[in-house]
Image (cartoon, rainbow, N blue to C red):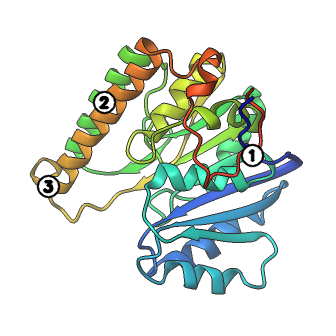
Amino acid sequence: MVKTKNIKEKSSNLLSVIIPAYRQEKTIVKDLSRIAQVLSKLRYKTEIICVVDGMVDNTYFLAKQFARNRVDIKVLGYRTNKGKGHAIRFGMAESIGDIVAFIDAGMDVNPNGISMLLEHFEWYQADIIIGSKRHPVSKVSYPLLRRIMSMGYQFLVWVLFGLKVKDTQVGLKLFNRKVLKKILPRLLVKTYAFDIEMLAVAYSLGFRKIYEAPVEVTLDFGGASVLTSREFMKYCGSMLVDTLAVFYRLKILNYYRNGNKRRWRYDPELNFKVNIG
């Protein structure tokens, strides 16, 4: 019998918010303060879990100092950068809320959107709510070429996975805990396409109540064309490779199915507790 660990037993009426952070020493205190202020206005009890994805600067120490007298903020981290997806899963594994969200540090996404996602979550009795740049009432500022590439990618996602959403890549999403308990032990992607893997696996397991909610997003690319940015094009290439790998595991290998439990790659750093034997 194989045993691993899964996310802890839930706490009712608690919202857990995971904040992955990497090289955010200039903004992390401001980010945590702003998110905490937003959460203080909600009718839910809340916990913040900041996960520092690699101790390469002072992000961890500044966050830890800010949170030292706050019982509602937990700061975690590890030495080596492993990717945003890994950091989010790491935080989710430590969460105890019956609703679990994540939002990027850096404030590209306005944290006030959390309340809007919660309203949608309750109204639709949803499995997952996605912040969407392409929602008709979203407020978005980012380059036209980035918009076109995003639309092309979302068409690919629809063709490959059948996900009937218009945007999967905004760094603000909200999950019902029952969804996480099913999908977390199966996930592999630590970097670029972790959003797609989470959504595609959830959808394949029957969690079809996935809806989009409006967000306010401001992305600053320094005025440079995304098509002339080597770093951005490398990101796009890696994103495509990761997405096709998720499709291969899902549709060809059937890796994510219950019958393949013993093949799931358990990451010992994640605090999983579920018996999968």
Residue 225: x percent and y percent?
A: 14, 53
Q: In terms of sequence position, does the residue under pointer 3 or pointer 2 come before the other?
A: 2
Q: Return the mark for residue 229.
A: 3
Residue 17: x percent and y percent?
A: 68, 56
Q: Are marks 1 and 3 in contact (CB under 8 Å)?
A: no
Residue 75: x percent and y percent?
A: 65, 72
Q: Residue at x 78, y 63 (%)?
A: 41
Q: Quadrant of residue 91?
A: bottom right
Q: Nearer the viewer, mark 1 or mark 3?
A: 1
Question: What type is the residue that disc 2 sits on?
Answer: Tyr
Crowding near pointer 1: few (<14 within 10 Å), some, many (20+)? many
Q: Return the mark for residue 96.
A: none
Q: Are marks 2 and 1 in contact (CB under 8 Å)?
A: no
Residue 32 drawn above or below residue 271: below
- Residue of label 2: 153
Question: What type is the residue that disc 3 sits on?
Answer: Ser
Crowding near pointer 2: few (<14 within 10 Å), some, many (20+)? many
The one nearer the camera, 91 or 277, is: 277
In this view, which residue lies farthest toward the right?
Answer: 12
In this view, which residue lies farthest toward the front?
Answer: 1
Q: Residue at x 71, y 32 (%)?
A: 2
Q: Is residue 162 visible?
A: no
In this view, which residue lies farthest toward the left?
Answer: 228
Q: CA distance from mark 3 to mark 2?
A: 18 Å
Residue 269 drawn above or below residue 243: below
The one nearer the camera, 215 or 72, is: 72
Residue 239 drawn above or below residue 52: above
Residue 268: x percent and y percent?
A: 61, 51
- Residue of label 1: 7
Q: Residue at x 62, y 66 (%)?
A: 50
